[in-house]
Amino acid sequence: MIADTAGRGELPSGGAPTHSRFVNDDLLPVPVAQRRWTTYNFAALWVGMAHNIPSWLLASGLVALGMDWKQAVFTIALANLIVLAPMLLTGHAGPKYGIPFPVLARASFGLRGANLPALIRAGVACAWFGIQTWIGGQGIFVLLGKIFGGWAEAAEVGGQPWTLWVCFILFWVLELAIIYRGMETLRRFENWAAPFVILGALVLLVWIAVKAGGLGPLLDQPSKLGWGADFWPVFFPSLMGMIAFWSTLSLNIPDFTRFGAGQRAQIWGQSLGLPTTMTLFALLSVFVTSGSQAVYGAAVWDPVQLAAKTDNVFGLLFALVTVLIATISVNIAANVVSPAYDLANLAPKVINFRRGALITGVVGVLIMPWKLTETPELYIFTWLGLVGGLLGTVAGILIADYWVVRRTVLDLAGLYTPGSRYWYTSGWNLRAVAAFVVGGVLAVGGSHSAEGKGPFPEDGLIPFLKPLADYGWAVGLASSLVLYVALMRAERARAVDGPVGAPPRTPRLNRRRG
């Protein structure tokens, strides 16, 4: 490996084992000269991803649970500050080595074993892609129906108006057309999409404030929970749910940071982009909804439904474009990039980035997202709870391996070479698998549902683990991190010359050169 003065490593010319079945052009390290993303690019990426309809609706879910607007915004802000930490820790490997998430996972899980976390992440992303595409298609359907009229009364196909299916399919095709052009097109799209979406949200706020003659009565409503004994049992599960919203990106953020010009760009870009944007967006949603309560007599939390209440054609078209851009910016970046790399990692010689993106689009439709969003219990509690627990477990292992076991030192060529230090046992690090299984059971084993409200037993899948279920992400991350470190150190102590997969015991100068 060759390292520059900033510590950024790349493979020398001809140093890539191109004959390896674990290599294709999309999985190889990004050359240092092509790592051009700046602080603004990363901040714009997060602004574009955070400003979407499901993010807008987060505060409404918390208010529905009995919080007042201040408690809801506080919960969202704290969750995003917490999830920022693993984002920055896993994102560090991107600018330093130019590698995507599934290749980084090879260091801890093994060259073959990395497919386990990669496919879990890919499955989650495919489901989210379908959900976001369905929500975006619904937004287009509502707004175009307001402009042209009669759309909701169209003949039904599969239980939905055929006009809704057309909006869904057209939106799906548009998303895949953008991502098919590659990551550089995504970077340019996010650069101008971010300020446009902010402008759209502010226009909605000004419009409703003018109609309401102020921000409305919602801001004056007291909490139904208070700050005492009734609040905390709701707060902690809600906090884990808000963390789970972006726990997906805390794994595959190297897919983006690998294009970073340096650590400063990814650290400052993410720190400025994620927690601030999510908090401000939560505030915007509360203010706009409060105004809607004053105007219409009831809180309208869905921004699409609220925008559809205007009779101004220009306003409707502006809202339509804003919904399109906001949903595309989050869906492509958060839910297509990751599975495209993850699926490429499964069969590098057959699947490249573009084919992985197309597979993601097809799977996102096959999972029938209109079914996943039918009930809030299935969509919010079951879905986010399981996702957060499992992905927190994987994040704990990645962080433990990269920061504690290897101290950020990787053998770059070895990540692509069978028989290297990352080959472990036939390509699998069984210690990582054990930490994942134990952490996953602790995180989601106590999953439970209220009677008639979800798929789990009321007493939990494993009853004695039920108290841990409300803290799934934190339990999964902490337990897998501690267990993985313990298992790897035990193996190192047992081996005479250090375990397979241990960081190279070479002088510091040689480490920088791989």
Image (spheres, rainbow, N blue to C red):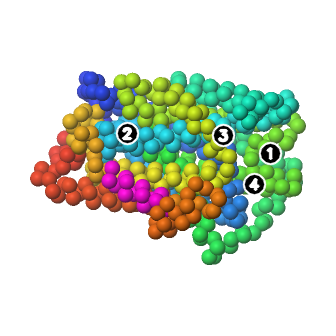
Q: Secondary structure at mark 4?
A: helix
Q: Is residue 143 left or right of residue 295?
A: left
Q: Position of residue 286 (x, y in %)?
A: 73, 55
Residue under pointer 2: 115
Residue 3 visible at all: no
Distance from label 3 to label 2 (Cα)? 28 Å
Residue under pointer 3: 370
Q: Is residue 448 left or right of residue 296?
A: left
Distance from label 4 to label 1 (Cα)? 13 Å
Magenta residues span 433-446
Residue under pointer 4: 287
Distance from label 4 to label 3 (Cα)? 29 Å
**Foreground pick, 331 / 37:** 331
Residue under pointer 1: 306
Q: Is residue 138 left or right of residue 82?
A: right
Residue 351 visible at all: yes
**Residue in the image at 26% along x and 57% along y:** 487
Q: Quadrant of residue 482?
A: bottom left
